[in-house]
Image (cartoon, rainbow, N blue to C red):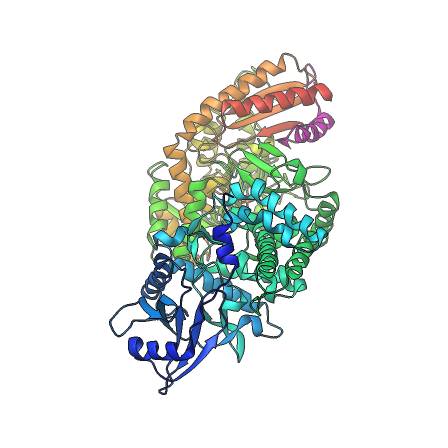
Amino acid sequence: MSSDTPLIKFLDRNTPQISAEEVREAARVQFDLTGTFEELLSERDQNFDIRGENGDRHVMRIANIHEDFAVIDFQVRALLHISQQDPSLPVPKILPSTRGEELSRITFGDGEHLVHVLSYLPGQLLRDVDECAVEAYRNLGAAVARLDLALRGFFHPAADQVHPWHLEKCARFAEHVNHLESPEARKIISAVFDNFEQNVLPRVRKLRHQVIHQDAHGGNVLVDPKNPVNITGLIDFGDMLYGSLAAEIAVATDSAEVKIDLLPDVICETAAGFDSVLPLDAEEIDLLFDMIVMRNALSATITASRATLSSDQPEFMESPDLYVDTIEALLSIGRDEITRRVRHACRFPAFCPASADDAYSESREDDLIKARHRLLGKKTNHFYEKPQHFEYARGPFLYGTDGRRYLDCYNNVPQVGHCNPHVVNAIARQAAALNTNTRYMYSSVIEYAERLTAKLAPHLDACVFLNSGSEANDVAWQMAKLITGNDGALIMEDAYHGITEVIREFSPAHPDTVLPPHLKGLVVPDPYRGPYRDDEPDIAVKYADYAARAIGELAADGHGLAAFMIDSALCSSGIPDVPDEYMRVVEKHVRAAGGLMICDEVQSGFGRMGQWWGHEYHSVKADFVTMGKPAANGHPFGVVVTSSDILNEFVEKTSFFSTFGGNTVSCAAGNAVLDVIERGRLIENGIVVGDYLREQLRELARTQPLIGDVRGHGMLTGLEFVTDRESRAPATEEVFALLELMRQRQVLVGREGGFDNILKLRPALVFEKKHVDLMISALDDSLNQL
Ligand code: PMP
């Protein structure tokens, strides 16, 4: 700091000492105010409470003689601006002088002072409330945020004034720390100054800035004495400056009037109240602890410095010890704990560490696992020996609470990348505008249905909206039965179609599923492991014959065929390389028996297989296309697309309605997913990157004998492992171990197939070749370690 002068000016209070007589006269002449006059406490000005005979009450503020015009003009202009922007905010209103001036120059005995008059706000100072409920701080946070919203478009040249309480300029006070008496206190406060300057300030400077009040501590906040959680006034605009919004919260939680043990709650409530009006950024919350600690360090330093400069300490100034105690208490609770609690109070997602240094402790993870077992059941599936904990994701990566980044080659729900910002914004914006159901008219569901059906064959021209793939399959099945009058169905022998009671029966992949007589499971057309392999002549027809036989058996048992339900990706069958023509031949058998085609595109839809729909890849005509998982990139959304004739008949007979199906938010998400796929040409990308992945895997197979087969289309790849390429003996145990080894190398994959010896790779369509390279190298390493 070049000179102490400006600071001394602030530290030395030097308040005006104008006589009551002079003030009374000026009030009468300049403002037409008479009545009783009472001097109020003030840090730097001289203020009078004036009660008129008619009950009016005003405060006359006489500025310090050294005060610049711009500094007071700043306050007056801000108050005028606020009363225009948010007239009902409980802040003082300016009373112009009899000459119409909002800010007057009045000469008293000691010279010319700037004077303005404000309406008096009723209430009791928050600082003076005994046993103040923390709820008051929630209301205070909200009131300050409202004030800042009103100040948003306001600026004044004096907003950049030299200001002792400006957190971002606090370094000027670092050398004043020696005014603190106790060496221990000096050590603590110096460390706070150093940390703030070096580590915190560069980040604070990047936070949202505007003109802020910056003084809403309990000495400037009025509450209703009858119900002291209600804020009736925010006063004293003398500390306004251009600063960060987050600083408002640091000041409002000033420890002077808060019992230390309540401070964490007060911080949370204030932040949550502020956030409810003016949502906070994650970075603002992350810096709040440091700013609160710095504010206390500044308070300690300024109060200690003032005490040495002048005996004339205002009676409301606390002793520096209070602030030092507060800092110690906060540090002992810890930055992480306070930040975690504030995030939680504002409903931010749980914190995810950016590096291994901040990883969650083992005991915290263990507690969570225990709670998970207790609350969600002991048998919840979590793939790994110890569940992998994530709290954050972006694009192709998930971020663990161990501080590590994991490449996601497994999850096909975030089709356009985890937390795709376009989809996230669409969800948030729609949720903030309207969230209702299809009993009402709204445009997004129509737009979505229009866009979706335009991507399908012309006869697929109507949609039923639901909440999951299971529901979509359930409803498609209900329609197929109704339309055909039959109740028999074909499925794959290890199919998975969902969890409703009916659809569980269609899912022999569930270990407990027993096929009822009206369902027949077909042998999987798997040329690598099935009964007909490789170059077997007429392989498609031979596999399709299983369907013809099954239809005959159903008929013999009195079950006419209603539908063939088929996952176009055959995911639960291990993504076999289905022989060309197989699906078309089966379709012929199905249609000949009067059955319909339910094409389950929960896995294969939205470009997964290098085309919009998997059934198009197999060149079959769908009567129902069912969709889920990727439709809304993670938001629950299910769809059945069929013909309008079928839909109309079904709805007429059943009065079908789903409360959440097709709600405005789901449709906004669905539309955004289509936007991202179309605008980013992601299906084309998936073809290029998917082909590259399989190429690299085949290359790897030259040196890794466990790799038996590589197959797939677009961004869907099956990788089958065998202990012996000749016999094709499944490498089940090795694949179990591989999953763990890949996780250790920060790559997520999943296993599949009857022998659990197949890796299914379904990365997001935003995957790039560099991500493939990461995956290949992790796989190579892991296989070498097996
Ligand atoms: N069909 C297929 C092919 C699936 O893979 C799944 C889910 N794995 C479903 C249907 C069921 O979808 P959901 O879990 O959304 O009910």
Q: Residue lying furthest front in this view?
A: 109
For residue 490, side relative to residue 658 (left or right): right
Q: Nearer the viewer, residue 319 or 333?
A: 319
Q: Nearer the viewer, residue 93 or 407?
A: 93
Residue at coordinates 52% horizontally, 23% vertically from top-left? Answer: 770
Residue at coordinates 65% horizontally, 12% vertically from top-left? Answer: 703
Q: Is residue 746 magenta?
A: yes
For residue 294, side relative to residue 95 (left or right): right
Q: Is residue 77 visible?
A: yes
* Coordinates of residue 203 in the picture (x, y in percent): 52, 42
Residue at coordinates 46% horizontally, 62% vertically from top-left? Answer: 144
* Coordinates of residue 429 in the picture (x, y in percent): 40, 51
Q: Residue lying furthest bottom in this view?
A: 53
Q: Is residue 206 magenta?
A: no
Span highlighted in magenta in the image:
726-753
Residue at coordinates 37% horizontally, 33% vertically from top-left? Answer: 679
Q: Nearer the viewer, residue 594 or 722?
A: 722
Q: Nearer the viewer, residue 411 or 294?
A: 294
Q: Quadrant of ligand 1?
A: top right
Q: Residue lying furthest top in this view?
A: 702
Quarter holding the C terminus is top right
* Coordinates of residue 378 in the picture (x, y in percent): 73, 49
Q: Is residue 334 visible?
A: no
Residue 95, relative to residue 615: is it above or below? below
Tally of numbered tags: 0
* Coordinates of residue 759 in the picture (x, y in percent): 62, 28
Residue 58, relative to residue 650: is it above or below? below
